Image: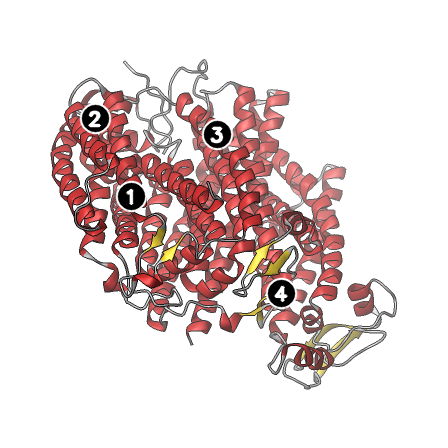
Amino acid sequence: MVNDLARWQFATTIIYHFFFVPVTIGLAFLVAVLQTAWYRTDNPDYKRMTRFFGTLLLINVAIGVVTGLVQEFQFGMNWATYSRFVGGVFGAPLAMEGILAFFLESTFIGLWLFGWNHLPKRVHLATIWAVSIGSLLSALFILVANSWMQHPVGYRLNKSGNAVLTNVWALFVNPTFVWGYAHVILASLITGSLVMLAVSAWYLRKQRHIESFHRTAKVALIVLIPAIVIQLTVGNQLGEIEGHYQPMKIAAAEAQWTNCRPCSFSVFQIGGGANDKTPSQIILVPHLLSVLATGTWSGPVTGLNQLQAQYQARFGPGNYVPDVFIQYWSMRVMAYLGSLVLLLALWGGWLLYRGKLRSARLFLLLSVWAVVTPFLMNTAGWLLTESGRQPWIVQGLQKTVNANSPSVSATEIWISLSAFVVSYIVLGAADLYLMLRYSRHGLAQADAEAAEPSEAPGAAVPALTY
Amino acid sequence: MQLHTIWFILIVILWLGFFVLDGFDFGVGALHMLIGRTDTERRVVINTIGPWWDGNEVWLIVAGGAMFAAFPGWYATLFSAGYLALVLVLVALFARGVSFEYRGKRDDPRWRAGWSWAQTIGSILVPLLLGVALGDLLNGLPINQNHDFTGDFFDLLTGYGLMTGVTLLTLCLLHGATFLTLRTTGEIRDRARAAGRVIGLVAIVINVAWVIWTLVVMGGGTVPQPTQIFGVIAVIFAALLVNTNYNGWAFASSAFAIAAAIGQIFIALYPNVMVSSTNTAYNLTVNNVVSGHYALVVMTIVAVLFLPIVLLYQGWSFHVFRQRLSAPPASAEAPGGGEQLATQP
C-alpha cells in the first residue's frame, strides 16, 4: 500500500513536471534564436517576438522550477531505502546538475528578464543563451542519473551492499544515456517548436500581425522538420539499445509473449495484455518488429515467457514482466503521433517553400491543435521507459517494492499526494489561464514594452517587471 | 583534512549561502504587504529581489543535492523524517515561487491580493520550517539503529526546533528590512526602517534566548563559542544600524547574524550530522553516512572548479542591478501593468 502510493505520487508529480520541462528547454532555445535574429538584423519585429515568446517561456519556467523541487526532495522523502542504496552514484550527477546547470539557468534568467534596456545588447543576448545552455545541461545530468537506473555502469557494491561510484566517465558514455539524451533534447525541440507553431498559426488564422507570426512559424518549422526526422532514427536506435539491455521493456512494448523469428509488428490489437493470453484482434505487418528491435530483416525477439523464465533462474521467484498494456500503447501513442507530426511538419515545409503558409487555413487549424501532441508523446515516452523498467527501480539491482522509506506511513503519503494534486491543479489552472490569455493579448503588451526608449546601459533598473 | 570533513564544511557553506541570500528574499516577501501600501509600491518592493530570488533559491537545491551525493544516509533519513514538514515547505515554495511571475500578469486587485498573500505566507513558512528541521538535527529525533525515524509529525515539533525556526524567521525579517533600506528610496525606505527597528529589537531578545538554549542543548558547562558571541553582536549592530544611513553596514550585519546562526548549529553538530534521541549510539555521523571516496574526489573537483564561477556570475548579477529602486509617480503607471522604468531621484 505504502509502496503503491509512493509510486502513484512519483508518477503523478514527474509526469506533471515533464509537461513544463520540454517547453522550457525548447522555447528557451527558440527565444534565443529569435533574439539572435534581432541582434543580427536589427529588425524590431524580431525583438517584439522575442519578448512575446520570452514571456510565455517565463510563465512556464515558474512552474517547471517549483515542480522540479518536489522531485529533488521526493527521493529522500519517499524512497529513503533507494536513496541510501544509490546515493553514492546517483547523487553525484544530481549535485552536478545543481552546480553546473541550475545556478546558470536561474541566475541568467533573472539577468535576461531585468536586463532589457540595461545590459549592452550583445551581453543581453548572451544571457538568454546562458539560460538555454543551462536548461540543456540540466537535462544532461538528470538523464545521466536516470540512465544509470536503466543500465547501471561504473559502480561496485560496498560492504554494506550500497552502490558506490568507481568510474564517473562510464556514466556519461552509457549508451542508454547517449541515445536517451539525444531523444529528450529532440523531444524538447519538437515540443517548443510545436508550441511556437501553434501560437503563430492561431494568429495567422485570425489574420492578425501576419508578417510577425509568419516569421515565427517559419523559425518553428525550420527547427521542427529536422528535429522530427532525426527523432524517428534516434528513437529507433534507443529502442534497439533498450532491447539489448532491458529486453523485457521492448518485448512488453510488442506484447510478444513467445519467441519469434522473423517477428511481425502489430499495428493494433485487442486483448493479449495478460500472461499467456493471445490477442483476439490484431493487424500485423510482417518483419517490422524484427527490423525495429534488431535492425535486421529477420532478427529474433525473445518472448516475455522465455524472459520471465530466464529472470527467475537468475534473480529468484517473482514476476519480472512489466505492465504490458502500458508498454504496448505508450509505444504506439509515441510512434503514431510522431508520424503524424512528421507529416504535418513536411506539409508545413512544403507550404513555406511555395509561399502559401499564410493562407493555408486547414494546415493552420491542424497546427493549432497539434500543440497537444508533444505532451501526449512525452508522457507516453516516459511511461514506456519507467514502467518498462519495473519491477526494478535500478535494473537488476534493487526492486521498486523494496525501495521506499520505512518511516513514512500511508496516511502521510495520502496527505502529501492530496496536497500536491490540489496545488498542481491550482498552479496548472493559473498557468494555462495566463498562457492562453497572454498568447491572445500579450502582443500589445510586448509592443508597449518594446516601444519604451532604450536607455544607455547602467541607466536604471526596472522597478515594475514583476 | 579528510574528504568527509571537507564535504561537511561545503554543505554548511551551501546552507549559509542559501539563508544569507534567500534569507532577504524571504524577509522582503514576508514584509512586502506591510511596507508597500499601494499596488505600485508592493510591486517595487517585490522587484527589489526580482532579478535574484530564483538564483538564490538554487543554493537550497544544491545543498540538498550535495547531501544526497556526499552523505546519502543523511539525506535519506532527514528527508523521510521531516516528511510532512517538507511537504509544507514545498507547497510554500510553490506559492512563493509562482507568485513572482504571476502576480503582475493580470491587472485585477483580487488576483494580485491573492498572489501577495501566497508570497507572504510562503516566505514566512519556508525559513520557519527549515529552521525547525535544522534545530532538530542538533536536538535529536527518535531514530533507530537502521537510521530510520520512528516518530510522527508532532515529534518534529520540539521546543528547541520551534525556537530555532522562530529565530531564523526573525533574522530573515530583519535581513529583509536591512536589504530594503539598501535597495529603495523615499517612503518605502522609511517604512522599511521603521519595521526594521521593531523587528531588530525582537530579534535581539529572541536570538539571545535561542543562543542560551543552544548552549543547554549542547550540554551543561559549555562556554559560548565565538560564533555565538559574534552572532549576537551582529544582530545588535543590525538592529541599531537599520535606522541610520549606514545601510550597507546594517545589511552586512544582518547577513553575518544569519550566517552565525546557521554556522553555530552545524559547529555544535559536528561530527554528528543528525542526533538520535532514542540512543546516541544510533546518531548519524559524517563517518557512518558518507558516500564512497572516489565519488567525493570527483565531486570535490567539480565543486572547486565550478563554484567559484557561480560566485563570480552571481556577484556580477548583484553588481548589474545595484541601483536603488523607487516607486514611479502614480500617473506614470500605464494601464495593463506595462513595464515601467524608475530612476533614482
Looking at the picture, do discs 3 and 2 lie on one chain?
Answer: no
Which amino acid type corresponds to the residue marked 2 in the rendered image? Ile
Where does residue A129 sit, x and y in percent of width and height?
Answer: 57, 32
Where does residue A446 sit, x and y in percent of width and height?
Answer: 46, 31
Mark identifier at residue B62: none
The answer to whether the residue labelled 3 contacts the one labelled 2, judged by CB atoms less than 8 Å apart, is no
Q: Which residue is mark 3?
A: A112
Q: Nearer the viewer, residue A398 or B318?
A: A398
Question: Label 2 marks which chain's residue?
Answer: B
Please give the name of the residue rendered at 33% of the width and 40% of the height, measured from the top-left corner.
B103
Looking at the picture, do discs 4 and 3 lie on one chain?
Answer: yes
Q: Which residue is mark 2?
A: B188
- Residue A281: name its quadrant: bottom right
Q: First in sequence, mark 1 or 2: give its number.
A: 1
Question: Label 1 marks which chain's residue?
Answer: B
Q: Which residue is mark 4?
A: A384
Q: Is residue B49 visible?
A: yes
Q: SS for tag 4?
A: helix
Q: Which residue is mark 1?
A: B119
The answer to whether the residue labelled 2 contacts the one labelled 4, judged by CB atoms less than 8 Å apart, is no
Which amino acid type corresponds to the residue marked 3 in the rendered image? Trp
The answer to whether the residue labelled 1 contacts the one labelled 2, judged by CB atoms less than 8 Å apart, is no
Looking at the picture, do discs 1 and 2 lie on one chain?
Answer: yes
Residue B38, above or below A403: above
